[in-house]
Image: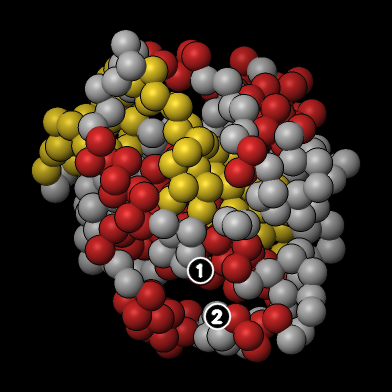
Amino acid sequence: MNKLLIVGTLAYDALRTPYGERPRILGGSGLHAAVAATLDGPVNLLSIVGGDFEKKYLDFLTKRGADTRGVKIIPDGKTFAWSGFYENDLNAHSLQTDLNVLTQFDPVLPPEYLASEYVFCGNIDPELQGKVFAQLPERKFGALDTMNFWISGKKTILLEVIAQADLLFINDAELRQLTGEPNLLKAARALLKGRLKYVALKKGENGALLISADKIAAVPSFPLSEVTDPTGAGDSFAGGFMSYIARHGCRAGLSLPAKACRTHRRPATDWTALRQALVYGTLTASFNVQGFGCERLAEVTKADLAKRLELFREIAGVCAE
């Protein structure tokens, strides 16, 4: 049984950056999160694609350890598509977005997915995120991502769904837009209602910040000489973070084996585990941005991640207990 469920888009991207371009490449929040998460173990994947979605891409996901029984195929439909470009500041500029079969997405979990203990809802309609959470009332830990489009158009329902999650992934601008509070610490803590206990701030080249009602954890980004394509960096960060929580949710360091981890018998929301997940997600995302789409991350091994962790410790002074 796969513990972690990832819900998000599978898409075709067309993009251009200062380092080149790809007229048609695999993309989407579900794709980047799943590729990141399967670096550490199998996942359940819930998404929707059209008949134009090539079988080789489903085979690729299956081979990595993603259960794709939750990927619905609309034979006469077209897969969600996005095109855009990045300039030297590496901020995204959208040219065209075609929702296509995404407008038909009804996130009903297959029976095999109903035992998922951990869930990450990528950047999709908050009504759909809420529907996923409703099908997993016994989940141990749930997280979601969002964006300015949903904050502007569906703020009320979004806030309701955020209160049903354990953790919210969001960036600085989105957090300020959502709360109307310029101070990020105050803004994050203003959202800690209902079930929500944590806000993970995605700060791009400035790293990441984890905020609870009484604690703060911060990690810098891993310094890179080249960032080829930042598409999906936030999703790969979330996928890496959630995979760590799902596999090693008790109090344990990144270097401890699973057997040693289990002996601690700590809950999944242990603060130490969350801090370690922040590091794990940050390092996973650092590989993602080194290639177009998920090309680089798909090549990464656990040994590569362990080596980067050691470098990260030296550079940032991060001590994984």
Decide: is 191 above or below 237: above
Q: Are marks 1 and 2 in contact (CB under 8 Å)?
A: yes
- Tell me which corner region of the image, top left, top right, bottom left or bottom right, holds residue 227: bottom left
Crowding at label 2, few (<14), some or many (≥20) Cα neighbours within 10 Å?
Answer: some
Q: Quadrant of the N terminus?
A: bottom right
Residue at the right extreme?
194
Identify which residue is drawn at 47% across, 84% down. Answer: 313
The amino acid sitting under disc 2 is: Leu
Disc 1 to disc 2, how far (Cα)? 8 Å
Residue 189 visible? The answer is no
Could you tell me which residue is drawn at 49 percent across and 43 percent down? 45
Q: Residue at x 39, y 69 (%)?
A: 222
Determine whether the residue tagged by mark 1 lies in a helix, strand or loop: helix
Helix, strand or loop for disc 2: loop
Q: Quadrant of residue 97?
A: top left
Residue 236 position in % (x across, y down):
44, 52
Percent x, y of residue 9? 44, 32
Instruction: Point out which mark residue 30 bears.
Output: none
Badge 1 or badge 2: first in the primary sequence? 2
Q: Which residue is mark 1?
A: 280
Q: Which residue is mark 2?
A: 254
Residue 285 seen in the current view: yes
Say whether residue 71 is left or right of residue 258.
Answer: left
| Amino acid type shown at disc 1 | Tyr
